[in-house]
Image (cartoon, rainbow, N blue to C red):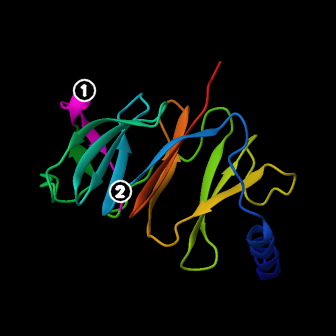
Amino acid sequence: MSDEFQKQLRERLERLPYADAPPPWRIAGGSGIGGLTEVGFADGTDDLLVVSSQGRGLFDCLTGERIARDYEEMFENDDESGMTAPGIGKHANTIFRLAGLQGGGLSLFTRDGWGIHVVQLPWPIHVVFLTSEYKGLTDDTGHITKLCNDEPCSYRAAGFSPTGRSFVVATSGELTVYTRDVA
């Protein structure tokens, strides 16, 4: 990409207004979670483990409800890399792959063409975009929604569940859960 094209793209993305997620997406829930460090989905589900300095929580991302809570402050993770953690509640025997402060990542695309894009725009602010119909951020046909940014907190992770029926945006102080019905 030429420098001029990159500059024009950045300016276009900065001018986009923030908006709600387009149909069929809707906010299922959100939660203020101080000290959030990592999140991860159980394989093949919409169940999300949230790790924070206040313990661990398990969320059903189809409803946005917290379905289990571990109040162990300063959770002692046996995985020194911080890239996995044991589950709680109905996933007590599950090892979750995590994304967040230590790295890692969640799925950025669904099989039916939705995408999550996180851009530092302007640096150091992380802006989360949702695209549809297999489009990227260079597309200018109206398939881009500028959802949110990480202010005043710090970005941790954003991405889709393994089913593609939900996605999350996690910062150091907040979790936002989006869901959709799939026929």
Q: How far across and how far down the image is residue 51, in percent?
A: 28, 52
Q: How far across and how far down the image is residue 121, in percent?
A: 64, 74
Residue 132 left/right relative to 181: right
Q: Residues within 10 Å of mark 1 (few under 14, many from 20)?
A: few
Residue that label 2 marks? 33
| Quarter residue 171 falls in | bottom left
Residue that label 1 marks? 90
Residue located 29% across and 41% down the image? 96
Which is closer to the viewer, label 1 or label 2?
Answer: 2
Q: Amino acid at mark 1?
A: Lys
Compared to 1, does 30 lie above or below? Answer: above
Residue located 35% across and 56% down the image? 33
Q: Is residue 94 on the magenta stretch?
A: yes
Q: How far across and how far down the image is residue 19, in percent?
A: 72, 55
Q: Amino acid at mark 2?
A: Ile
Q: In the rendered structure, which disc, 1 or 2, sits on the residue that comes first in sequence?
A: 2
Residue 52 left/right relative to 77: right
Q: How far across and how far down the image is residue 14, in percent?
A: 74, 72
